[in-house]
Image (cartoon, grey):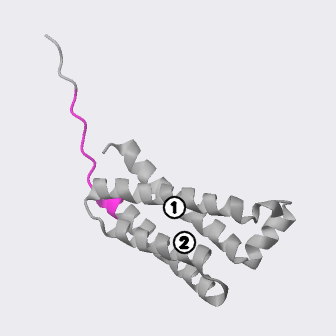
């Protein structure tokens, strides 16, 4: 894996987790996010038909980054933690309501954040192989 793929994996994991968490918190009706949407005139975004696909795409981006990280550092642990966090987040958004929903969304977000940090640290500690210089032609 080259240096560019390493940076993409680190950035995409964080971006996917942040996007999924913000959308999930919006679904849960977090007052700060609902207030920001109302203040900016974006309240129409608080619609499950918009938020659920956003959560799905963001989680796919994050899990794809964890997969790339696994290829880089060789450990599936951040990927597994990310899968558990993504599942918890989705269960909290789609299948439950009330306090349990908020607990599952918060727990899933924390697990995804921990997986992102773990993955980024493992990628950072991996040595970057140097590219071989092209053979000169005689």
The residue that label 1 is drawn on is 59
Residue nearer the viewer, 112 or 89: 89
Q: Position of residue 77 (x, y in %)?
A: 31, 69
* Relative horizontal placement of residue 54, taking residue 87 as reference (left or right): right
**Residue beneath the point at 28% across and 58% down:** 73
The residue that label 2 is drawn on is 90
Secondary structure at badge 2 equals helix
* Relative horizontal placement of residue 96, taking residue 115 as reference (left or right): right
Outermost residue, top direction? 138
Q: Are marks 2 and 1 in contact (CB under 8 Å)?
A: yes
Residue nearer the viewer, 109 or 123: 109
Q: Position of residue 113 (x, y in %)?
A: 49, 71
Which segment is the magenta one? 122-133
- The quadrant of the rendering that contains the N terminus is top left
Instruction: Mark 1: give few (<14), some (14-19) or many (20+) Cα within 10 Å.
Output: many
**Residue beneath the point at 53% across and 64% down:** 17
Quarter holding residue 28: bottom right
Q: Position of residue 99 (x, y in %)?
A: 64, 89
């Amino acid at each position: 894996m080259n240096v560019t793929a390493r940076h993409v994996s680190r950035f995409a994991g964080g971006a996917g987790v942040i996007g999924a968490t913000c959308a999930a918190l919006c679904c849960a009706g977090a007052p700060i996010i609902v207030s920001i949407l109302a203040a900016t005139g974006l309240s129409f975004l608080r619609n499950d038909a918009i938020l659920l696909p956003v959560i799905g795409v963001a989680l796919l981006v994050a899990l794809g980054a964890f997969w790339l990280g696994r290829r880089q550092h060789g450990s599936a642990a951040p990927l597994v933690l990310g899968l558990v966090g993504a599942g918890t987040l989705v269960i909290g958004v789609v299948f439950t309501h009330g306090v349990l929903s908020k607990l599952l969304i918060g727990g899933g977000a924390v697990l995804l954040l921990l997986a992102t940090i773990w993955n980024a640290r493992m990628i950072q500690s991996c040595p970057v192989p140097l590219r071989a210089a092209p053979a000169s032609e005689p």
